[in-house]
Amino acid sequence: MPYLLRVQLPDVPGSLGRVATAIGMAGGDIEAIEIVEKRDDGTAVDDVLLELDQGMMPDSVVSACNMLEDVEVLWISRYPAGGNLTMDLEAVEELTASPDDAFDKLIDLLPATFRVDWAARVHRAKGVVYGTSAAPDELEFIEIETPTRLEVPEDEITIFAAARLDGNEIVVIGRRGGPEFADSEILRLGHLCGLAVTIATS
């Protein structure tokens, strides 16, 4: 059964090896690792895609990691079967392959690229003009200049982030239950939206 684990650890040689060993000792099989963020305080945040045998509880992996010095599990959740950690460059390649549909393709790619539940394009006057299957039918257009986290008081479960496509459209992504969007994820979202605009208008 696949799980996605987000862990904070010291950004020094050997730290990831200690975490990997702890996960293996607890019965987890690592499928992939992606560095999410390197922070100024000397720590790093990594996402670990791992497989647990049927009947195993993720708590054993969390406990094993948290027992390591200066290591903290920030979040763990079931991950869709067959999921993989799509890299930004792969997303850009797909956008480049179909520039006429770059905006819609971007929306289709964002859930896998950022491990979120849905993505949508929201127009200033028309509302949601394109979204993935789990996206809400209605989202409010918000005037933003830079990519940002969004506060949506009526939804206390979903974590939202958004970036501007142009003066009339924004991209919104939603992650149910966390984890919070890291600063690097917010920047990546803005970067990918900017690339999509460049690709679509070139």
Image: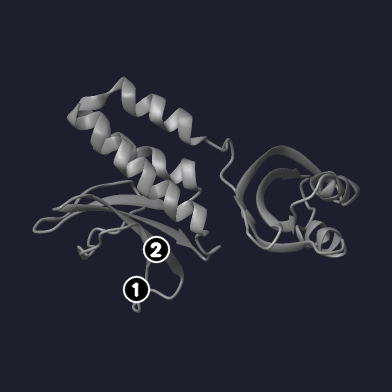
Count of numbered circles in the view: 2
Q: Report the residue that reaches farthest toward the right.
A: 25
Give the residue pinned by disc 1. 152
At x 56%, y 44%, the residue is 80
Say whether residue 77 is left or right of residue 124: right
Say whether residue 22 is left or right of residue 136: right
Crowding at mark 1 (Cα within 10 Å: few <14, some 14-19, many 20+): few
Say whether residue 15 is left or right of residue 136: right
Q: Report the residue that reaches farthest toward the bottom.
A: 153
Circle 2 SS class: strand
- Give the CA separation, mark 2 to mark 1: 8 Å
- Residue 95 lies in what quarter of the image? top left
Give the residue pinned by disc 2. 160
At x 63%, y 60%, the residue is 40
* Position above or below: 122 against 89: below
At x 43%, y 55%, the residue is 186
Q: Report the residue that reaches farthest toward the front.
A: 40
Percent across and percent down for residue 37 are: 60, 51
At x 40%, y 38%, the residue is 109
Q: Amino acid at mark 2?
A: Phe
**Residues under numbered marks 2 and 1 in contact, where contact means CB atoms less than 8 Å apart:** yes
Q: Which of disc 1 and disc 2 is earlier in sequence?
A: 1
